[in-house]
Image: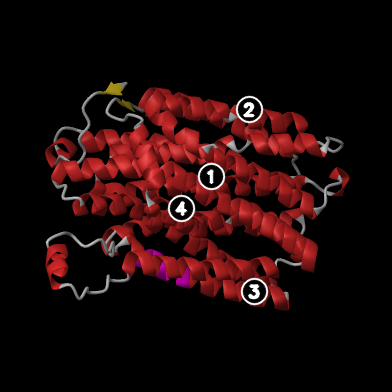
Amino acid sequence: MWIQRWDPEDVKFWEEEGGERVARRNLVFSILSEHIGFSIWTLWSVMVLFMGPEYGIDPAGKFFLVSMATLVGAVVRVPYTFAVARFGGRNWTIIAASMLLLPTIAAFVAMEPGTSYTTFMVCALLTGVGGGNFASSMTNINSFFPLRKKGWALGLNAGGGNIGVPVVQLAGLAVIGAGGGPRVLLGIYIPLIFVSAVCAALFMDNLATVKNDTGAAKEAVRDAHTWIMAFLYVGTFGSFIGYSFAFGLVLQTQFGRTPLQAAAVTFIGPLLGSLIRPVGGRLADRFGGARITLWNFVGMGAATAVVVIASMQESLALFVAAFVVLFVLSGLGNGSTYKMIPGIFQAKALQKGLQGEAAAAYGRRLSGASMGLIGAVGALGGLGINLAFRQSFQTVGSGTGAFLAFLAFYAACFCVTWAVYLRRPAATPDSGRAADEEAKPQLTYAEV
């Protein structure tokens, strides 16, 4: 179960000695575990649709419930990142999958009218452990694949996990449509959690070469690019997960949709956003993550502007269509921004004069250390989105104010992406210094 030698950058090892086969097998079962983790993390986006007037919870209270699930899911991503090296990728996947039983069983027991709001809050907080699965899964898969394959592999891993959001919402739709209660939905997921844990035990591996590097973690925290990428990831993944939690509630609160009507369209955006995430990674592999991310924020801003218009005109059809486009673009941006991370640190390695395996090792070391932090901060964007919706509905009775704030944020993301990763450095009048700089790789990151 422990693999002692792992060198994916070695083409012979990768293609002839079975490296690719092992990596792909681990990817498949990593996706399964992460998929169910996302479903449990976003469970309360469905549970609130079951909570009619008999539960005595107003829309603001429901937005706060889903916000707490988002918060915990973001925070636990940091320790989950380091757990892979501490316990092994296979071993930690077994543990993380098994921990999903706690929030699922807790919700199964509590989900009925008359339960206190505090109890519901605790149940929602517990589902946050599902959000941590993303960080450990991405850190693990990042170690299995060579740089030239990371965009596609990380995109598949994350996209397959993200699909857990629309799948649980589709399952909720089926249960509501059949006249079933929330315990029916929870009863479906409890055995699936057991299946994912068993599959991880049987088919995944631990890499002995992956070690927790305290120095790398400290270096990643001090590196400005970690925080810049975290900011951009708030704009992409934060949007995806925040909208996934909020979409159904917005439809119910602003447009008066019934639970069944809301559930019938809630899953569409998360589904398309999840499916397109690997495409974002593939486009980033081909054209450069920074370029794709830049124009993606342009598209997100345009879609948000249409959502604002639809919200002000109370046009449900236009609102849903523009919101779905916004989901698709957030998924595309998820893939392109995450591909940028290993590329950025690889570029830094080249600037330091490292080459070949030394440069690749430096890139893996720093990108692995930064991914958990970037993922955690990005997920906090989902918390911000739900709190913004809560405040907007309390203040003006609609989500328009929140969408205007999101539009301004996407404009800021566009500016940061262009200024840091695409703007060419200005020429210096000092010819001696210019000649010296020409001898080194330029840190423009246009191809990351």
Q: Amino acid at mark 4?
A: Ala
Question: What residue sits right under mark 4 in the picture?
Answer: 230
Residue 145 image offset from top left, x and y in percent: 28, 41
Asked if residue 185 lies left or right of residue 333, the reply is: right
Question: Element type at marker 3?
Answer: helix
Question: Element type at marker 1?
Answer: helix
Queried whether the magenta region covers residue 246, the answer comes back as no
Residue 154 image offset from top left, x and y in percent: 36, 47
Q: Residue at x 38, y 50 (%)?
A: 155
Q: Tell me whether the residue at label 3 lies in contact with that at label 4, contact meaning CB atoms closer than 8 angstroms.
A: no
* Crowding near the residue tagged with mark 2, few <14, some 14–19, many ≥20 C-alpha atoms within 10 Å: some
Question: What residue sits right under mark 2 in the picture?
Answer: 102
* Crowding near the residue tagged with mark 1, few <14, some 14–19, many ≥20 C-alpha atoms within 10 Å: many
The chief SS type of the magenta part is helix
Asked if residue 64 lies left or right of residue 21, the reply is: right
Q: Nearer the viewer, mark 2 or mark 1?
A: 2
Q: Tell me whether the residue at label 2 lies in contact with that at label 4, contact meaning CB atoms closer than 8 angstroms.
A: no
Q: Amino acid at mark 2?
A: Leu
Whichever of callouts 1 and 3 sits on the residue coming sooner in the sequence is: 1
- Up the image or down, 88 lies above or below 375; here it is above
Q: Residue at x 68, y 55 (%)?
A: 387
Question: Magenta segment, which residues?
Answer: 291-298
Residue 55 image offset from top left, x and y in percent: 84, 43
- Up the image or down, 198 lies above or below 333; here it is above
Residue 280 appears in which quarter of the rendering?
bottom left
- Up the image or down, 424 lies above or below 337; here it is below
Q: Disc 1 to disc 4, how far (Cα)?
A: 23 Å
**Residue 153: image tag:** none
Question: Element type at marker 2?
Answer: helix
Question: Element type at marker 4?
Answer: helix
Q: Amino acid at mark 3?
A: Val
Q: Residue at x 22, y 73 (%)?
A: 428
